[in-house]
Amino acid sequence: MVVKLASLKADLEREEKGDWIEFPDWPGVWFNVSSLHLPAFQAARDALYQRFGRTYRKKPVPKDVLSVEMGKLLNKHILHGWRGLDLAYTPEVAEATLSDPAYRNVVGAIEFCAAKVSDVEIEFEEDAAKN
């Protein structure tokens, strides 16, 4: 069998606009997220790391500082909504949640779902010209 090349093509529109992805560890919890491949997110993340490099030089970035800033970036570029949590989604509630290091599990869930938006359905076909 061989892989169909066309089945590996990313759905760039879905990655940009986002989609509802269920987080498998929390039944009934869904996040509307864009892909981590979103150019605006990647540019903002890269700029953040450059700023951290100038600030901290060769020292590690403190985890609480990194988690606050990454939470803000995820809220601004990746997360568009949630369902199944006791608090209704608003950008303000999301920013407060994602920039609080104690909610690292929520940040991880959003990152997981944002990675899933980029998944493709790999298709195979029989290799007609077997070597």
Image (cartoon, grey):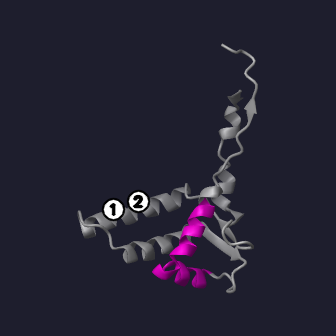
Q: Is residue 107 magenta?
A: yes
Looking at the image, residue 114 sits to the left or right of residue 43; the answer is right
Give me the residue at 58% from left, 80% from top: 94
Q: Which residues are magenta?
A: 91-114
User: Is there any visible trace of residue 100 in the rendered image?
Assistant: no
Give me the residue at 29% from left, 63% from top: 53
Q: Is residue 80 magenta?
A: no
**Quadrant housing the N terminus:** top right
Q: Amino acid at mark 2?
A: Asp
The residue nearer to you, when weighing 23 against 45, is: 23
The residue nearer to you, when weighing 131 against 111, is: 131
In the rendered image, residue 128, in percent from the top left (x then y), is placed at: 75, 18
Q: Residues within 10 Å of mark 2 (few under 14, many from 20)?
A: few
Q: Secondary structure at mark 1?
A: helix
* In the depicted structure, whether residue 25 falls above or below residue 43: below
In the rendered image, residue 10, in percent from the top left (x then y), is placed at: 65, 46
In the rendered image, residue 118, in percent from the top left (x then y), is placed at: 63, 52
**What distance separates the C-alpha of mark 2 from that of mark 1?**
6 Å
In the rendered image, residue 66, in percent from the top left (x then y), is placed at: 40, 72
**Where does label 2 land, which residue?**
46
Q: Secondary structure at mark 2?
A: helix
| Disc 2 + disc 1, Cβ < 8 Å | yes
Looking at the image, residue 92 sits to the left or right of residue 56; the answer is right
Give me the residue at 73% from left, 33% from top: 124
Give me the residue at 67% from left, 86% from top: 87
Prevailing secondary structure class for the magenta stretch in the rendered image:
helix
**Where does label 1 land, which residue?**
50
